[in-house]
Image (tube, grey):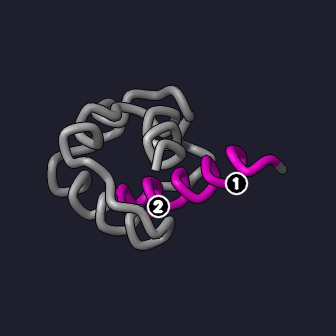
Amino acid sequence: MSETGSIEESVREIIADVLGADPADIPADQALAALGWDSMNSMEALVRLEKQFSVDLDLRSFHAAYTVTDMVALVEKF
C-alpha cells in the first residue's frame, strides 16, 4: 500500500470513529456533511488527525476540506 493509501485509511478510520460509522461506509469523495458531519465532529477530527500524523493543520484549510480525499491532501501538505 502506498503512503497516500495508508494516510487515507487512517483518515477514514478517524472520520468514521468520530461519526460512529463503519469506515467502509465513508466514500473518499463523499461530502462529509451528507453523513451528518458538523462543527463539533470537525474539531474532534482535527485534534485526532494532528495527533495521529504529528502535524499542525491550518484551521481554515481544515474547515474547507469537505471529503476524506480533501483531508488526506491537507495532511500530506504538512
Which SS does the magenta portion mostly show? helix
The part of the chain drawn in magenta is 2-20
For this orientation, the residue located farthest to the front is 78
Is 4 within the magenta?
yes
Residue 6's mark?
Answer: 1
Residue 32 at what x, y percent from top left? 36, 36
Residue 77 lies, in percent from the top left, at: 48, 42
Q: In this figure, which residue is indicated by the disc labeled 2?
A: 14
Which x, y percent locates residue 53?
Answer: 50, 65
Furthest residue in direction left, as rendered: 39
Task: Single out the mark in the foreground, 2 or 1.
Answer: 1
Nearer the N terminus, badge 2 or badge 1?
Answer: 1
Q: Secondary structure at mark 2?
A: helix
Q: What amino acid is found at the position of numbered circle 2 in the picture?
A: Ile
Give the side of residue 32 with respect to residue 53, left or right.
left
Q: Nearer the viewer, residue 7 or 40?
A: 7
Kind of residue at disc 1: Ser
Residue at point 28% right, 33% down?
Answer: 33
Q: Residue at horizontal 16%, vertical 56%?
A: 40
Vertical arrangement, residue 45 with respect to residue 35, above or below: below
Check disc 1 and report its element: helix, strand or loop. helix
